[in-house]
Image (cartoon, rainbow, N blue to C red):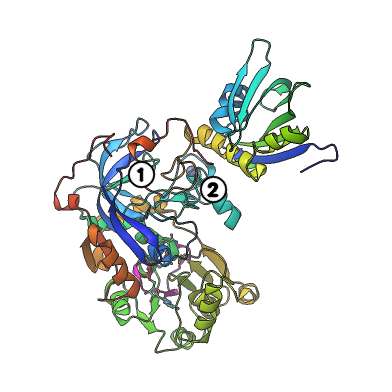
Amino acid sequence: MKANCWYGKRDVRVEDVPDPQILNARDAIVQVTSTAICGSDLHLYNAFIPTLERGDILGHEFMGEVVEVGAGVTNLKVGDRVVVPFPIACGACTACSEGSWSLCENSNPNAWMAEKLWGHSPAGLFGYSHMLGGYAGGQAEYARVPFADVGPLKIPEGLTDEQVLFLSDIFPTGYMGAEMCSITRGDVIAVWGAGPVGQFAIASAKMLGAERVVAIDRFPYRLRLAEQKAGATDTINYEETDVYDALMELTGGRGPDACIDAVGMEAHAPNFMYGMDRVKQSIMLETDRPLALRQAIRACKNGGTISVIGVYGGFIDQFPMGAIVNRSLTLKSGQCHVHRYLKPLLERIQKGEIDPSFVVTHTLPLEEAARGYDMFVNKTDDCEKVVLKTSSAFGKQVKRPTPGQA
Amino acid sequence: MRGRDRTVTVKTSVTIRREAQEVYRFWRDFSNLPRFMQRIESVTVNAAGRSHWCARGPAGAKVEWEADIVTDRPGDRISWRSREDATIVNHGAVLFRPASRGRGTEVHLTVGFEPPGGAIAAKILRLFDAVPEQQLKNDLRRLKQILETGEITRSDASIHRGTHSARPPAMKELPNVEGTVQS
Ligand SMILES: NC(=O)c1ccc[n+]([C@@H]2O[C@H](COP(=O)([O-])OP(=O)(O)OC[C@H]3O[C@@H](n4cnc5c(N)ncnc54)[C@H](O)[C@@H]3O)[C@@H](O)[C@H]2O)c1
Ligand SMILES: [Zn+2]
Ligand SMILES: [Zn+2]
């Protein structure tokens, strides 16, 4: 099959690789129709996440048709159309039973690696380094889905791939980001980053009753999308305006009730700190640049909440702990517990409360993954979200070689 | 940990969402141990209850010994000790304790051995990876996977010995033994 493989910093290539096989009884093989490139993939693309190997298949946002199920999978059958959540979860451990799916205790065969870096291991993820499992990703014609009796969501007729694909990650992630803000009617929520994750955080904050939602970014086309489609009431271009001042102006000096960091470890800023953080990052004094996070903490109202859905991998410097303690701030975070949100968010899509396809700006064949990454990382051609289509999406049935010929 | 009596002791633990009796029963059948203990190739038990252990290290070093059960308290603990004439004098104990809030059972494993010195000692140390704690902890994690999910969790990379890119194995690379193969 064809798959998008990582070969080093800003080097991905679509190659021919063996087809996936059932390795555990609870596996299913999905023939991918649509798969997306995520901001999280950019952290891999830019080589900020350790324990990637040359040749790793990337991708964790994908959907398609079930073509094979293991003996232990009874709830899915060949031909089912499914969306697959990006965290791999067993459904049987304590974390899963408590709804903390992205903390599954059994899905990371390389748990010891993550344990070394973070103290404990979270769940394994598709296409996201060896420390998070060493699983092949979904930017491919086929994907093996472990614990397929737990994760995949069956999609009812009448919805396009673009409407449901983002249930795999960014819609639930944005939603969880807003949910962690414990929004009550009348709240003002500020969202750093108007990428796809930020857009869904904005839309979700509105759905959950926020009165004002402020989008912060530097790309006018992304801020426009936030305002016109996601429902942001205000936008701040941080290259033109001082973010802190603008937020105080918008909130009568109180600061937002909650702040969402939808930027993560590769934040950018047009000032001296950015240079400092880039230098530190390059010599590994810190691994992540927390510029948006620092700003969010500074601006948040006393007693407010900082909801961090942007991904961080390692260590940050100059963390304003003083503000958190002295101003009674609450910091909440996590890789999204996607499984929790699948059904309720699918219902919202079916009821027409939201059409997640609004973020898609580019649809390319899988073979052009490298071009997609390049546009998405450089934000060229007003790129917001890239969806990759395999040939099976165009109705062309790709023949699976019979096992043994792979 | 290396005591004054030259005994090397390694401890580790894991919490498994299963009743203590169930975990105990699985462990008490020593023939299950090789399913999750990476360095143990086989354990066979004779009619008298004496077990014969066969272990292999990362470099292929093979060591065998006989052991007797010392304590056997169903649902609570099992301990064993090699016979005095074993090439490596070793012992192990596993305790099953209920975890708080109904989170299943804490499994506490202690393994100790006395390196006899000289060439044999070197051979024995080669049974373990650089960090024996790590190895035993990984063993307990595999036990948890079996008891909670029914199988050892496999990924595209973890089925291979050593580093391998995360992409599906070619047919000839498909594993035929249970569990992950790490070097
Ligand atoms: N927690 C989760 O489960 C989860 C899931 C998916 C993605 N993510 C993370 O969410 C983050 C965003 O993903 P995305 O797909 O939207 O990526 P993206 O790169 O498209 O968006 C990031 C946006 O942040 C903006 N930005 C950079 N520096 C900024 C700053 N200082 N202030 C304000 N905005 C700034 C960029 O201009 C860009 O528009 C990534 O870190 C990604 O890894 C987390
Ligand atoms: Zn993603
Ligand atoms: Zn689990």
Residue drawn where x is 33% and y is 80% of the image: A219
- The image quadrant where one finds the C terminus of chain A is top left
Mark 1 near mark 2, Cβ–Cβ under 8 Å? no
The outermost residue toward the left is A395
**Magenta stretch, residue numbers:** A179-199
Please state which of the two labelled residues, at mark 1 or mark 2, is closer to the viewer: 1
Q: Where is mark 1, residue-wise?
A: B168
Which residue type carries mark 2?
Ala
Residue drawn where x is 26% and y is 47% of the image: A1
Subunit that carries the residue with mark 1? B
Subunit that carries the residue with mark 2? A
A388 vs A400, nearest the viewer? A400
Q: Where is mark 2, residue-wise?
A: A111
Occupied quadrant, residue A183: bottom left
Q: Is residue A223 left or right of residue B34?
A: left
A185 vs A225, nearest the viewer? A225
Check chain identity for marks 1 and 2: say if they share one: no
**Residue B107 lies in the magenta stretch:** no
Q: Percent x, y for residue B140? A: 60, 37
Q: Residues within 10 Å of mark 1 (few under 14, many from 20)?
A: many
A108 vs B111, nearest the viewer? B111
Q: Percent x, y for residue A360? A: 25, 66
Q: Is residue A340 left or right of residue A301?
A: left
Which residue type carries mark 1?
Pro
